[in-house]
Image: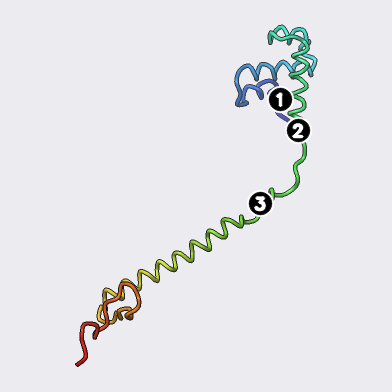
Amino acid sequence: MSRPGKGMEHVERLDADATSKARLKAILETLSGALSIDAACERLSISPSRFHALREEALAGALSALSPAPPGRPSTPGPDPTVAALERENAELREELEVSRLRTEIALAFPHLIVPPRGGQKGGSPPKDAGRTST
């Protein structure tokens, strides 16, 4: 034993504005023969040509919504090469940062192990015998 159909109550439960619901009800009622096109046009305050256009749009939308979709989940595009390159660069920079942090930590813990740069390099201290003259 089946339940009786709810008819136009289905339209009321849809999430749409009142005008759209009234149009859908009128279209369904004309399709079922419960309402004439002239009465539907009078109820909606539109011309018969506008009603026919609305009916065609509604039926085309319903047909499109009911068309079978390809089976399975939609395919996802592969990884973006730009994102992959940025992730590699990020990993390299993080590694460099960690190495630099460790070097600083070692330098602070063992300052006596730091070897100054040799004479010709910028920023180094002068060689030990730079100020002496030979006799």
Q: Is residue 112 above or below residue 27?
A: below
Give the side of residue 27 with respect to residue 112, left or right. Answer: right
- How far from the left and from the top, in percent, is residue 135? 19, 93
- How far from the left and from the top, in percent, is residue 129? 24, 86
Q: Which residue is mark 2?
A: 64
Disc marking residue 5: 1
Residue that appears at 70% across and 28% down: 3
User: Between residues 90 and 69, which one lies in front from this camera angle?
Assistant: 90
Q: Quadrant of residue 46?
A: top right
Disc marking residue 66: none
Amino acid beneath label 3: Thr
Q: Disc 1 or disc 2, which is closer to the eye?
A: 2
- How far from the left and from the top, in percent, is residue 115? 30, 81
Q: Quadrant of the N terminus?
A: top right
Amino acid beneath label 1: Gly
User: Between residues 107 and 56, which one lies in front from this camera angle?
Assistant: 107
Q: Secondary structure at mark 2?
A: helix
Q: Earlier in the sequence, mark 3 or mark 2?
A: 2
Q: Are marks 1 and 2 in contact (CB under 8 Å)?
A: no
Q: Earlier in the sequence, mark 1 or mark 3?
A: 1
Q: Secondary structure at mark 3?
A: loop
Q: Are marks 3 and 2 in contact (CB under 8 Å)?
A: no
Residue that appears at 78% across and 16% down: 52
